[in-house]
Image (cartoon, grey):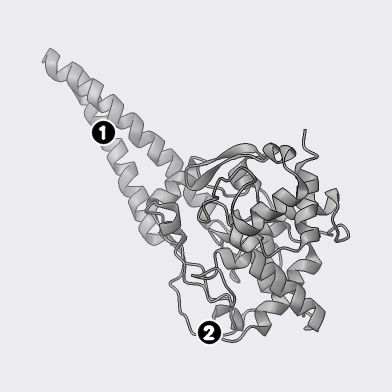
Amino acid sequence: MLTNSLIFLIVVALTLTVVWLTLRARRSSSRVTKWVGVAAGSIVGLILVVVSGASSRGLVMLYAPRGRAVRDMKVEMSTERVARGQHIAGMWCANCHTLNGELPLSGGKNLSDEAGMPLGDLYTINLTPAGPLSTWTDGEVFRAVRDGADRSGRRLPVMSAQRVRNLSDEDLMSVIAYLRSQPPVQNETPPPAPSFLTVALAGLNMLPLLPGMAPDTIVAPPAGPTLAYGEYMVRWMGCEECHGANLNGGGGGVVPKAPTLRSVKGWSRDGFIQTIRTGTTPFGKKLDPTMMPWKNLGKATDDELTAIYTYLTSLN
């Protein structure tokens, strides 16, 4: 935060300096100096004003306190709950919190590299019992996912942008149970350190940061190959991040640009499931696993993929 705050102050100082020089150029007796100075100063000054305003807003968005009070909770370590958490972790969490997409969740991936932009150090942390969560309470882990806040109430720049916050209370507790049950893996990762570019992009609404907070309590519909359960899965997996708010195509910037999912209406259920399992559409197109995480999503059960298919084909 200190580095980005200092850069912000430098940008503000440059902005004021350019404005002052532009005003001086307007009073110049030389017509060339006057008009060239005013034109150049106005362009540079406008750019600096935008950067100053955006970074000011971005600093607040990234560093302001966040999160509700920590719940006083202790998650039951039942066999069923651990198995459910492992299923969710392998199907989704492993996309980011591993280097190879496989459990355990030992972290180490710099999401800045994934974005192809100098966004700073955004390493996914080691979620095994050998990592930082070993000293966190279950309530603090719950808040990290639901509210995107660390144990001190500061924003987690990546987790606060993840739709996984929409996991039901029960599913989230199952994930916590699995995290506690993993074999410990020694892998220390740097703390998050967003670059100034990240700060500016946040202020310009060009990062997938989520406004507001998720509901305090979330209850999932009964599991099964139903439209309601498919909508629940699509929501917590965050398909809209790349496929647009209405799943009608979107993305771009720091997230992959993805097509509309309404095209699934022309597919059969078996064709959809086969696509997710193999990464090849019914029409022979290969899905890029760095753009569409089909390898991990393919670990979903047939009922879960049927539910997603049923929801997608219901969209108007």
In the picture of the structure, the residue carrying the numbered disc 2 is 185
Numbered mark located on residue 18 in the image? 1
Q: Nearer the viewer, residue 283 or 95?
A: 283
Numbered mark located on residue 273 in the image? none
Give the class, few, some or many, for how many residues have Cα within 10 Å of label 2's Cα (few <14, many ≥20). Answer: some
Task: Identify which residue is drawn at 57% across, 49% down.
Answer: 209
Circle 1 SS class = helix
Circle 2 SS class = loop
Question: Residue 220 at x, y = what percent?
Answer: 83, 59
| 73 displayed left or right of 31 | right
Give the class, few, some or many, for how many residues have Cα within 10 Å of label 1's Cα (few <14, many ≥20). Answer: many
Residue farthest toward the left in the current orientation of the protein: 30
Q: Amino acid at mark 1?
A: Val
Which quadrant of the figure has residue 302? bottom right
Q: Amino acid at mark 2?
A: Val
| 118 displayed left or right of 183 | left
Say whether marks 2 and 1 touch (CB < 8 Å).
no
Residue farthest toward the right in the current orientation of the protein: 222
| 155 displayed left or right of 201 | right
Q: Quadrant of the C terminus?
A: top right
